[in-house]
Image: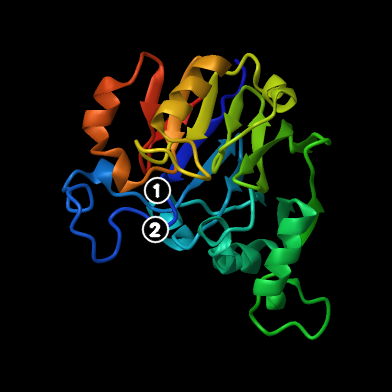
C-alpha cells in the first residue's frame, strides 16, 4: 500500500491570530475552539520524516499541541513575521539533530539573516544558538525532500512574490492575491489544495472568500481547505455550512491524510 501524507494544520489564522488582543468582535469572543486560530503553519509527515511549512510566532505552542521529536526541514513561503518569527524555536531539534535544513528563496534568506543574524553566523557563534542548512529555491526548480517531490509555485501577495508548494498530490498556498496562468498549470490533478481566504470583504493582498471559492473551483482539487483566516470571515461553523461540497474551512489541529 502506498504511504500517505499526513498533514496537520498547526495554525490557520491571519497575522494577528484569533482572538485579536483586546478585540470585542463576536468571533474573537467565541467559545468554539475552531474559532481560535494561531498563525498559519502546517506539519507534513511522511513515513518517519516531518516537514514544516512556515514557523510563525506561535511555533512553540503549536508543537507542544502536536509533538514531534524530529524535524527534517522547514519550507518558507515568504519573509513576513507571521510566517518566520518562530525560527528560534528550532533549538530543541538543533540540540538533538544538529543544523536544521531550511528551504527558502534567496530574498527570504537575506531577510532572515538580517533579523536572526545569530542563527546564520559563520564564526563566533553564540553558545546555544541554533544553526541551519540553507537550501535556496525558486519557482523554476523542483526539488526533493527525502522521497517526496516538491514543486514551488509562485504567487503574488500584493506586489511581493511568495512561494507555495506542491508535494505529490497536495498543494499549499497562502497569502495569495494573484497567480499567473503558467503557475496554475502546476496545480493540475490535485487531491488536496490549501489556499488562503481572509475575510468576506475584498483585501489588497489576500484572496477574500469569493476569490478563494472561484480559485478553488477553477483548480478543481478533490478537496480544498481554506486557511489564513481572520475574524472578519465569520464564525467557523456558519461559514463551513455554506461552502460547496469538497471545500472546507481548515481549523487548528485538523489532521488529514492524502
For the residue pair 160 and 225, the one nearer the viewer reads as 160
In space, the residues marked 2 and 1 are separated at their CA atoms by 7 Å
Q: Quadrant of residue 151?
A: top right
Horizontal relation, residue 201 to residue 145: left or right: left
One can see residue 221 in this view: no
For the residue pair 209 and 114, the one nearer the viewer reads as 209
Q: Residue at x 65, y 50 (%)?
A: 76
Tag 2 residue: 16
Q: Residue at x 79, y 86 (%)?
A: 124
Q: Are marks 2 and 1 in contact (CB under 8 Å)?
A: yes
Horizontal relation, residue 124 to residue 10: left or right: right
For the residue pair 204 and 184, the one nearer the viewer reads as 204
Residue 81: x percent and y percent?
54, 62
Element at label 1: loop
Using the image, determine if residue 125 lies above or below residue 256: below
Q: Residues within 10 Å of mark 2 (few under 14, many from 20)?
A: some
Q: Residue at x 71, y 57 (%)?
A: 108
Q: Residue at x 27, y 21 (%)?
A: 242
Element at label 2: loop
Residue 141: x percent and y percent?
83, 36
Using the image, determine if residue 204 lies above or below residue 242: below
Horizontal relation, residue 236 to residue 257: left or right: left
Using the image, determine if residue 124 lies above or below residue 189: below
One can see residue 48 in this view: yes
Residue 105: x percent and y percent?
76, 51
For the residue pair 86 and 131, the one nearer the viewer reads as 86
Tag 1 residue: 13
Using the image, determine if residue 258 lies above or below residue 47: above
Amino acid at each position: 500500500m502506498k504511504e500517505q501524507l499526513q498533514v496537520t494544520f498547526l495554525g490557520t489564522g491571519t497575522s494577528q491570530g484569533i482572538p485579536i488582543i483586546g478585540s470585542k468582535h463576536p468571533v474573537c469572543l467565541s467559545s468554539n475552539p475552531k474559532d481560535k486560530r494561531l498563525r498559519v503553519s502546517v506539519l507534513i509527515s511522511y513515513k518517519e520524516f516531518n516537514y514544516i511549512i512556515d514557523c510563525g510566532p506561535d511555533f512553540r505552542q503549536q508543537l507542544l499541541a502536536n509533538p514531534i521529536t524530529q524535524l527534517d526541514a522547514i519550507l518558507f513561503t515568504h519573509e513576513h513575521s507571521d510566517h518566520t518569527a518562530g525560527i528560534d524555536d528550532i533549538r530543541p531539534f538543533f540540540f538533538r539533530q544538529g543544523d536544521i535544513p531550511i528551504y527558502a528563496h534567496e530574498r527570504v534568506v537575506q531577510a532572515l539573516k538580517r533579523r536572526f543574524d545569530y542563527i546564520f553566523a559563520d564564526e563566533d557563534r553564540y553558545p546555544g544558538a541554533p544553526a541551519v542548512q540553507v537550501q535556496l529555491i525558486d519557482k523554476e526548480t523542483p526539488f526533493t525532500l527525502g522521497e517526496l517531490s516538491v514543486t514551488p509555485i509562485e504567487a503574488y501577495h500584493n506586489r511581493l512574490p511568495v512561494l507555495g508548494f506542491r508535494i505529490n498530490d497536495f498543494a499549499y498556498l497562502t497569502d495569495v492575491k494573484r497567480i499567473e496562468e503558467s503557475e496554475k498549470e502546476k496545480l493540475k490533478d490535485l487531491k488536496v489544495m490549501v489556499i488562503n481566504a481572509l475575510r468576506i470583504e475584498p483585501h489588497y493582498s489576500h484572496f477574500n472568500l469569493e476569490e478563494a471559492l472561484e480559485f478553488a473551483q477553477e483548480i478543481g482539487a478533490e478537496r480544498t481547505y481554506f486557511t489564513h483566516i481572520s475574524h472578519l470571515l465569520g464564525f467557523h461553523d456558519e461559514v463551513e455550512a455554506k461552502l460547496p461540497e469538497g471545500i472546507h474551512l481548515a481549523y487548528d489541529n485538523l489532521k488529514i491524510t492524502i
